[in-house]
């Protein structure tokens, strides 16, 4: 692992332990050249995934982009980081174990919508407004009505 401070390629692992989400290893490292200390995370990657965009362009799957999507939708919402990490890890696991190496961006978006629906209604509406390209207030009203109907059917869902 290259040192982020001096660029040396000879860093040493001082401590390894499972990360909070259990799906990665957290490693504390030190650079013998500059004595810089830093942390890395190691995850299992079952296969290299490619995302097919709406335009037909293909790009490598980026887990961090998925995390950023959740962060944007959940900005200033009371959802623990651990729950977000579990949702992201679940989506990545499903994508990797699907057997497909090319996944459409629409499929990823649907999985994010499904995960957000169970995490936070406001975040779900935020993400849906972009994903479904809302252009009128009626679009918001329709989604909010669906959520309200779901809560009316099962009052235990109300937050």
Image (cartoon, rainbow, N blue to C red):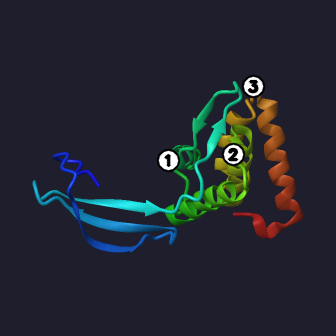
Residue highlighted by disc 2? 108
- Whether the residues at callouts 2 and 1 have beta carbons within 8 Å, the answer is no
Against 42, residue 124 (above or below) is: above
x and y percentages locating residue 54 in the rendered image: 71, 29
Residue highlighted by disc 3? 135
Density class for disc 1 (Cα within 10 Å; few <14, some 14-19, many ≥20) is: few
Closer to the observer: label 3 or label 1? 1
Density class for disc 3 (Cα within 10 Å; few <14, some 14-19, many ≥20) is: few
Question: At numbered mark 1, what does the secondary structure look like: helix, strand or loop?
Answer: helix
Q: Quadrant of residue 87?
A: bottom right
Q: Earlier in the sequence, mark 3 or mark 2?
A: 2
Q: Earlier in the sequence, mark 3 or mark 1?
A: 1
x and y percentages locating residue 148 in the rendered image: 82, 53
**What's the mark number on residue 64?**
1
Using the numbered discs, state the Cα–Cα distance from disc 2 to disc 1 in whole angstroms.
Answer: 13 Å
Closer to the observer: label 3 or label 2? 2
Against 66, residue 133 (above or below) is: above
Q: Nearer the viewer, residue 29 or 106?
A: 29
Q: Is residue 119 left or right of residue 29?
A: right
Question: At numbered mark 3, what does the secondary structure look like: helix, strand or loop?
Answer: loop
Q: Residue at x 64, y 27 (%)?
A: 57
Question: At numbered mark 2, what does the secondary structure look like: helix, strand or loop?
Answer: helix
Against 42, residue 102 (above or below) is: above
Q: Residue at x 87, y 54 (%)?
A: 149
**What's the mark number on residue 54?**
none
Q: Nearer the viewer, residue 44 or 72?
A: 44
Density class for disc 2 (Cα within 10 Å; few <14, some 14-19, many ≥20) is: some
x and y percentages locating residue 129 in the rendered image: 70, 36
Against 74, residue 81 (above or below) is: below
Q: Nearer the viewer, residue 80 or 28?
A: 28
């Amino acid at each position: 692992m290259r040192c982020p401070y001096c660029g040396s390629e000879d860093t040493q692992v001082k401590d390894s332990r499972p990360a909070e989400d259990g799906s990665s290893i957290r490693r504390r490292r030190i650079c013998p050249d500059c004595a810089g200390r830093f942390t890395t995370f190691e995850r299992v990657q079952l296969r290299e995934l490619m995302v097919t965009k709406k335009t037909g362009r293909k790009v490598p799957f980026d887990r961090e982009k998925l995390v950023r999507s959740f962060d944007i939708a959940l900005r200033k919402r009371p959802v623990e980081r651990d729950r977000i990490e579990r949702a992201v890890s679940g989506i990545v696991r499903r994508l990797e174990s699907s057997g497909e190496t090319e996944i459409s961006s629409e499929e990823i978006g649907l999985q994010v919508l499904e995960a957000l629906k169970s995490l936070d209604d406001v975040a779900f509406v935020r993400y849906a407004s972009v994903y479904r390209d809302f252009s009128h207030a009626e679009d918001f009203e329709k989604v909010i009505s669906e959520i309200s109907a779901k809560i009316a059917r099962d009052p235990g869902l109300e937050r």
